[in-house]
């Protein structure tokens, strides 16, 4: 790999900016100053430093974001997008959200540049589960819960069976945990709307093997190697 590409992919700027950095004389390869941007290196064995700091090359990013309400799940939009929340990540402009959470929906959102994994996680074939906490109007009857569990005809498609658990309920609303293996447009909201219980709030707490845990709203973290491994296995990748 060329030295300038290595540094650009590691977050040190564009290829043009990196070439200036190399020419300045602060980049070393295995302890020797290098001013040639086209110098070939081996990322797995050569030690590259910039102004004394070792550079660790990353070509795949896996980020978990706790999405707040008010942000569009898109890379570009006239309104605020989730990408604003990770703009300090190197090469964030090459990343994209996996699937979509509505503007007013909060919770776990995976952001990556791994196209193959993203495709697997969102394709119904792989049946990757997604768990939501939904606050809905009113109380659900056993008959209504069964409808969700068995699949509902929404007109354009019939939902696959869902796992449903009522957590709390009072006179005005109920909190329901629902697990689905699809991710159609407004699916969870449409499912509850169909049985007469519009969604007031929707929050995703897990996606595949990933759990949101106590990650603060609006914050993100990188997945661990073990988390990435398990997520790939869930999507049929090794």
Image (tube, rainbow, N blue to C red):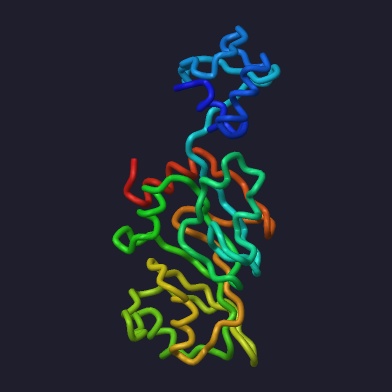
Residue 88, above or below 25: below
Q: Residue at x 63, y 17 (%)?
A: 23
The residue at the far top in this view is: 32
Quarter of the rendering containing residue 124: bottom left
Percent position of residue 189, x then y? 49, 80
Q: Position of residue 27 (x, y in %)?
A: 63, 16
In this rendering, position of residue 148 left or right of residue 26: left
Where does residue 51 sit, x and y in percent of width and height? Answer: 70, 18
Does residue 24 appear left or right of residue 189 in this picture?
right
Displayed quadrant of residue 195: bottom left
Foreground of the two, 142 or 19: 19
Expressed as whole percent of the image width and height from the top left, the position of residue 181 reads: 38, 66
Dividing the image into 4 quarters, which one contains the C terminus? Answer: top left
Q: Is residue 129 above or below residue 172?
A: above
**Foreground residue, 224 or 113?**
113
Residue ranking furthest to the left: 125
Q: How many marks?
A: 0
Residue sitting at x 48%, y 59%:
207
Asked if residue 76 is positioned above or below residue 140 in the image, the reply reads above
Who is closer to the viewer here, 173 or 72? 72
- Name the quadrant containing residue 167: bottom right
Q: Is residue 125 left or right of residue 10?
A: left
* Identity of the residue drawn at 65% across and 54% down: 85
Give the position of the N terminus as an image quadrant: top left
Q: Residue at x 52, y 69 (%)?
A: 132
């Amino acid at each position: 790999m060329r030295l300038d590409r290595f540094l650009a992919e590691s977050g040190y700027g564009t290829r043009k900016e990196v070439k200036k950095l190399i020419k300045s004389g602060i980049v070393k390869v295995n302890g020797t100053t290098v001013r040639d941007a086209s110098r070939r290196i081996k990322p797995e064995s050569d030690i590259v430093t910039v102004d004394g700091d070792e550079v660790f090359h990353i070509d795949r990013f896996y980020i978990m974001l706790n999405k707040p309400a008010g942000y569009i799940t898109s890379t570009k939009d006239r309104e605020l997008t989730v990408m604003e929340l990770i703009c300090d990540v190197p090469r964030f402009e090459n990343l994209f959200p996996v699937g979509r959470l509505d503007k007013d929906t909060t919770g776990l959102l995976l952001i990556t540049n791994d196209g193959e994994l993203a495709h697997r996680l969102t394709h119904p074939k792989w049946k990757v589960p997604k768990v939501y906490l939904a606050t809905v109007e009113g109380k659900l009857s056993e008959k209504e819960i069964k409808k969700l569990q068995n699949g509902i005809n929404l007109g354009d498609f019939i939902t696959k069976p869902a796992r449903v658990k009522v957590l709390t309920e009072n006179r005005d609303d109920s909190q329901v945990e629902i697990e689905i293996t699809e991710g159609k447009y407004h699916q969870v909201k449409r499912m509850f709307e169909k049985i007469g219980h519009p969604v007031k709030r929707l929050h995703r707490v897990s996606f595949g093997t990933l759990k949101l845990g106590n990650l603060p709203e609006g914050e993100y973290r990188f997945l661990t190697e073990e988390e990435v491994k398990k997520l790939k296995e869930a999507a049929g990748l090794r």
